[in-house]
Amino acid sequence: MEQIKQIITQAGVPCFGVCSFDAVLPLLPCRAANRLPGGAKSVLVCLFPYYVGDFPTRNLSRYAIVDDYHLLTRALLEKAAEALRKAFPEHSFESFVDSSPVREVQAGYLAGLGFIGKNGQLITEGYGSYCFIGEIITTLELPAASPSRKNCGRCNLCQNACPNGAIGERGAIDTAKCRSHITQKKGELTAFEQQTIKQGGFVWGCDICTDICPYNRSPKLTPLEEFYRDIVHTLTEENLYALCKTRAFGWRGAGVLERNLQLTDGHSQVR
C-alpha cells in the first residue's frame, strides 16, 4: 500500500481510500461502465477538496465558483492511473469521475473517507462535505479500509434548514422539492419552482444544507492550487456566456442560467 500511496500522492491527489469492488455492487447504469476492467477487485476512492473561502454575496453554489472540476479531477485521476499501470503492468486501472458506475458517496464511506450525512453527502474529516469524489477501479486486490463509525446522531440541522423539506431519512432527497435540483431543470417551471429559485437567490445550486452542517463550519482550504486560478462567485448577464465555457454548469446550457438570473433579479415569471 505504501507504493500505491506514493504514486497517488505524487500524481496530485490529496487523499484516497480503498474499498472492495464487490462492496459497491450493484453498479449504476451508465456508458462509462463499458470501461470497467474485467475481474475488478478494488476501488481507489479519491477526494478533491474544493473549499476556497467564503463569499457571502455569491449567487452560485460553492462548487461552481471554481473552474470545472470535471477537467481537473479527470486529469489528476488519469495521471495517477497511468503511473499505476506502469508500476503494475499486469493489472488494469480505469479512472472515473461524476459519470461513474459506482455510487460515489457510498464508495467514499466504504473506503473509510467519511460518513454519509442525513443530506446524503459524504462528510469527511477536515474538509467536511466540500469534496469532489473520483475513483480508480483496478484488478489489483488491495486491503480495504474500515468504514467510519461516525454519524449525524441527533443533529437535524440540515433537515430543519431545507426550505422545501426535501431531505428525508437516511440521505433520501426528494428532487422534486430540492432547490438545487430545481435550478438545473430545463423547460417551463411551475409557480412553486420559480418562487423557490427567486427566494433562494442562487442562479445555480443551493448550499443551505451543506453550509449549516457543523462539520462545515471551519473547513480546511483546498490544497489544489488549480481551484484558485479563476474564482468567480457571481454570475451576471455580462459573464454568463463566458462562464458556461469554464464552469461545471456549462453542460446545462445558457438558457437555464438566463432564466434563473431573471428570477433571482426579481423578474418573476410566476403566472
Image: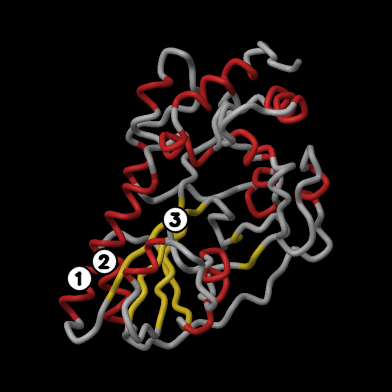
Distance between mark 2 and mark 1 Cα atoms: 5 Å
Depth check, front residue: 62 or 74 = 74
- Mark number for residue 98? 3
- Mark number for residue 199? none
Locate residue 5, reporting x and y percent: 32, 75
Task: Indicate the amino acid at tag 3.
Answer: Asp
Task: Indicate the amino acid at tag 1.
Answer: Ala
Q: Residue at x 76, y 15 (%)?
A: 271
Locate residue 263, reporting x and y percent: 64, 18
Q: Residue at x 72, y 30 (%)?
A: 193
Q: Which residue is mark 1?
A: 83
The answer to whether residue 66 is left or right of residue 159 is left
User: The residue tagged with tag 3: helix, strand or loop?
Assistant: loop
Check the image and report above or below for 34 versus 219.
Answer: below
Check the image and report above or below for 228 versus 56.
Answer: below
For marks 2 and 3 on the same chain, the one whose residue lies earlier in the sequence: 2
- The part of the image, by quadrant, that contains residue 244 is top left
Label 2 crowd bin: few (<14), some (14–19), many (20+), radius 10 Å: many
Task: Indicate the amino acid at tag 2.
Answer: Ala
Tell me whether circle 1 and circle 3 mark residues in contact (CB < 8 Å): no
Q: Which residue is mark 2?
A: 80
Locate residue 253, reporting x and y percent: 44, 30
Check the image and report above or below for 6 versus 259.
Answer: below
Q: Nearer the viewer, mark 1 or mark 3?
A: 3
Rendered-image quadrant of the N terminus: bottom left
Q: Nearer the viewer, mark 2 or mark 3?
A: 3
The answer to whether residue 86 is left or right of residue 144 is left
Tell me whether circle 2 and circle 3 mark residues in contact (CB < 8 Å): no
For marks 1 and 3 on the same chain, the one whose residue lies earlier in the sequence: 1
Label 3 crowd bin: few (<14), some (14–19), many (20+), radius 10 Å: some
Depth check, front residue: 9 or 104 = 104
Tell me whether circle 2 and circle 1 mark residues in contact (CB < 8 Å): yes
